[in-house]
Image (cartoon, rainbow, N blue to C red):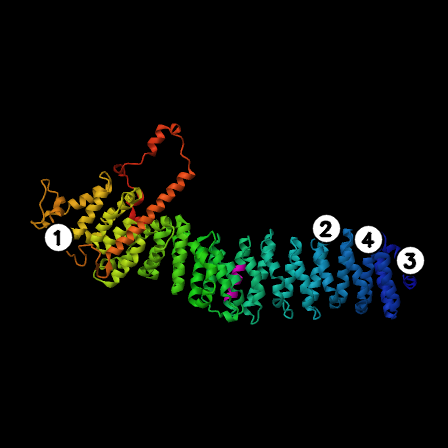
């Protein structure tokens, strides 16, 4: 300290701390000359003492004017040292940097000015302090004082010039600091950071691209900044980096892919679009590098396929198609299970387009990686079944395509049908709204006969009799009305002459026993008319209820459709199809006379022309109606109809034991009757009957069961049976 005081006059030191700028400036010029003289004499000890004096007594002084003077003095000392300043930077720079955080804005301003002058002298020599200088400038770029900001910007430009021309700059040491600062939200700091990234990237010797994953997320974060200028600068920097990636032979795609995937779900549209654009380019450029990240990328792309912004949808679809056409090896990191998991989750998306693409992915995986997919079937099966209730028909059809692809293997076919029946059982709306669509589509994809045989096998042992009855009625309606099942109908028509038809008839019969009308329909389709008549005759009083009559109404209407045209034409040959007439008249006798179905069937039978009968067999009534012809026939005991058997006496015909069949039907119907009684008893126990005097007269009338003649209003659903099947 004594050496410094002896070298610097006391007046100079007083002026250096004066409140007037001119006096401080003149004092600084004096110090510059003193340092020059000391340096020329090689008296470095006194120079060190002088710098120490300026630091301790001035820059760290509690008096702001002293701090200002100290900063000016350090800058002047550096100028005086000129080429020898580098060896004293360890003393000079730290107190200046410390002043950048001074509470007095004027001190901060002088700190910028001082460091600017120091940097001009030493140039690249002060690179060793770059991180500290960068950190200080980063803070000052957001300074509350406009003058300080202006001074900081001036210093920043000089530092950038020095760095770009220096070969001592260490990007490895700088990147951690940059990464830390990238999450700052202040717009001035963001501008400062983007400016530095752009400058450093322009330096050929600095490999910013290699460190891009370290600050890429920060750049994407700036794309949603409220300042248009910052968004534009960030986008420009990102565009430049993407172009460099396209031209670079070596890029770390993996780390950046993780960032892009996260940004693809950003609430900001521009950020999402930019992220997807990058992902799209990565998928095209990366080759096998991105294979381990396919699942994450797919998870980002699928939601964007349904984005409200058209540009995003276009890029997402393009990327999705590009990704799906790639063939990756599971041995190279392609995780089939994770891809399936992503697709499964997206099946719950609220957007139809996303659900459709998720199903396309499952289908693609099944086609390309079937052995691997089979291992994860239990994880996706329930979700696929739930998707059958999707409000979109296109989604349902695609789900069925996937199911059909899975069911190519026999064990999976059985599993599919079992799961499907389970879902129908627990979700009545699924059967009602989608049942026909699902069954028909599966029949197209998996062979109708195979599907119906499997369904029949399951329903045969169904413990829920109510569900079994409903299901059989639905399957029967589809069988009778759907064009997809025309081959089955043709085969069933050959039941009595073709072993294959007989086998199918017997296979369906066991489950069709759950519904009397379904059995009658099956017999009409198979032309086993005598058995149909036997079934009708076997019906008891309990079987003929409202549900039965509603189903019978549907059957009568179906008899008027093209499917049963052959049956109507057979009415022209009563001598050959005696049991057909008896069966139809049996149905007529079961129908209430005032019902629409009765009138339809009566009209049909009345339409049979008289000339179609032999004179010996037909004796017309006075009204001309041929209702008495059966009475005058031999009873059909020896009549055969191209395979139909005339007498259902328990003997087998063409391998079919009809006595066993009718017994099977009666036993099943008995189970239904007992089940109905049990359910009725349970309902009576649960619901107490009010006292007789408490039951209003109107309520008593309401409780009266309807007379069969009142059942002339046919439910809307039965009037549109063919539409329901579709």
Q: Report the span colored magenta.
A: 275-283
Residue 16, horizontal then vertical, whole percent = 85, 56
Q: Which residue in the protein does label 4 denote?
A: 21
Q: Secondary structure at mark 3?
A: helix
Q: Residue at x 57, y 69 (%)?
A: 251
Task: Judge whether residue 514 can be spotted in this image.
Answer: no
Name which of mark 1 and mark 3 comes first in the sequence: 3
- Give the number of the mark in front: 2 or 3: 2
Instruction: Please state, as top left, top right, bottom left or bottom right, where the N terminus lies in the image.
Output: bottom right
**Mark 1 to mark 3: distance in Å?**
144 Å
Name which of mark 4 and mark 1 comes first in the sequence: 4
Q: Which residue in the protein does label 1 denote?
A: 575
- Give the number of the mark in front: 1 or 3: 1
Q: Secondary structure at mark 1?
A: loop
Of residues 550 and 106, the one drawn nearer to the viewer in this rendering: 550
Q: Which residue in the protein does label 2 denote?
A: 145
Name which of mark 2 and mark 1 comes first in the sequence: 2
Name which of mark 3 and mark 4 comes first in the sequence: 3
Name which of mark 2 and mark 3 comes first in the sequence: 3
Residue 509, horizontal then vertical, whole percent = 29, 55
Q: Which residue in the protein does label 3 denote?
A: 10
Residue 52, horizontal then vertical, whole percent = 86, 62
């Amino acid at each position: 300290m004594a050496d410094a005081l002896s070298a610097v006059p006391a007046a100079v030191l007083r002026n250096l701390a004066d409140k007037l700028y001119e006096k401080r400036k003149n004092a600084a010029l004096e110090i510059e000359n003193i340092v020059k003289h000391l340096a020329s004499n090689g008296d470095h000890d006194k120079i060190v003492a002088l710098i120490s004096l300026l630091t301790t007594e001035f820059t760290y002084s509690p008096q702001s004017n002293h701090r200002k003077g100290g900063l000016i003095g350090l800058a002047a000392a550096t100028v005086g040292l000129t080429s020898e300043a580098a060896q004293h930077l360890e003393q000079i720079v730290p107190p200046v940097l410390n002043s950048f955080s001074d509470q007095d804005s004027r001190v901060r301003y002088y700190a910028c000015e001082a460091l600017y002058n120091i940097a001009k002298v030493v140039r690249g020599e002060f690179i060793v302090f770059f991180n500290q200088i960068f950190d200080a400038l980063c803070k000052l770029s957001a300074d509350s004082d406009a003058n300080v900001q202006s001074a900081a910007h001036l210093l920043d430009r000089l530092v950038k010039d020095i760095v770009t021309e220096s070969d001592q700059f260490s990007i490895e040491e700088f990147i951690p600091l940059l990464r830390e600062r990238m999450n700052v939200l202040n717009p001035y700091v963001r501008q400062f950071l983007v400016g530095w990234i752009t400058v450093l990237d322009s330096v050929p010797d600095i490999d910013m691209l290699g460190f891009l994953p370290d600050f890429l997320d920060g750049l994407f974060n700036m794309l949603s900044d409220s300042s248009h200028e910052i968004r534009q600068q960030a986008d420009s920097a990102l565009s430049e980096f993407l172009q460099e990636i396209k031209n670079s032979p070596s890029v770390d795609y993996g780390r950046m892919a993780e960032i892009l995937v996260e940004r693809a779900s950003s609430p900001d549209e521009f950020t999402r679009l930019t992220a997807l654009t990058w992902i799209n380019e990565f998928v095209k450029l990366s080759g096998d590098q991105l294979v381990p990240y396919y699942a994450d990328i797919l998870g980002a792309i699928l939601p964007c396929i349904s984005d409200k912004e058209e540009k995003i949808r276009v890029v997402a679809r393009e990327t999705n198609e590009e990704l799906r056409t790639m063939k990756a090896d599971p041995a190279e990191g392609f995780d089939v299970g994770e891809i399936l998991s992503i697709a499964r989750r997206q099946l719950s998306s609220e957007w139809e387009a996303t659900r459709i693409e998720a199903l396309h992915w499952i289908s693609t995986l099944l086609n390309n990686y079937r052995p691997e997919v089979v291992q994860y079937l239990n994880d996706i099966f329930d979700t696929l079944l739930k998707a059958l209730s999707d409000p979109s028909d296109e989604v349902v059809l695609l789900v069925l395509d996937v199911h059909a692809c899975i069911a190519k293997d026999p064990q999976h076919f059985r599993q599919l049908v079992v799961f499907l029946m389970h879902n129908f059982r627990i979700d009545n709306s699924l059967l009602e709204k989608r049942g026909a669509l699902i069954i028909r589509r599966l029949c197209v994809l998996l062979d109708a006969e195979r599907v119906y045989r499997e369904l029949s096998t399951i329903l045969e042992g169904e413990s829920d009799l109510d569900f079994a009855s409903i299901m059989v009625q639905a399957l029967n309606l589809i069988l009778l009305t759907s064009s997809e099942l025309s081959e089955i109908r043709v085969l069933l028509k050959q039941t009595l002459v073709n072993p294959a038809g007989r086998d199918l008839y017997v296979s369906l019969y066991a489950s069709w026993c759950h519904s009397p009308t379904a059995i009658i329909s099956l017999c009409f389709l198979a032309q086993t008319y005598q058995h149909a008549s036997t079934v009708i005759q076997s019906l008891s009083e309990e079987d003929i209820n409202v549900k039965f009559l509603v189903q019978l109404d549907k059957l009568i209407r179906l008899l008027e459709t093209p499917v049963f045209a052959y049956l109507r034409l057979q009415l022209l040959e009563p001598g050959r199809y005696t049991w057909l007439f008896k069966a139809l008249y049996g149905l007529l006798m079961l129908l209430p006379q005032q019902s629409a179905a009765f009138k339809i069937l009566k009209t049909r039978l009345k339409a049979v022309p008289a000339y179609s009968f032999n004179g010996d067999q037909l004796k017309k009534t006075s009204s001309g109606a041929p209702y008495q012809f059966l009475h005058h026939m031999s009873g059909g005991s020896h009549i055969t109809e191209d395979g139909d058997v005339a007498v259902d006496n328990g003997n087998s015909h063409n391998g079919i034991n009809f006595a066993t069949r009718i017994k099977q039907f009666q036993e099943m119907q008995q189970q239904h009757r007992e089940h109905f009684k049990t359910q009725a008893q349970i309902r009576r126990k649960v619901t107490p009957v009010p006292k007789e005097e408490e039951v209003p007269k109107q309520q008593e009338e309401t409780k009266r069961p309807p007379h069969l003649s009142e059942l002339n209003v046919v439910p809307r659903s039965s009037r549109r049976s063919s539409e329901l099947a579709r």
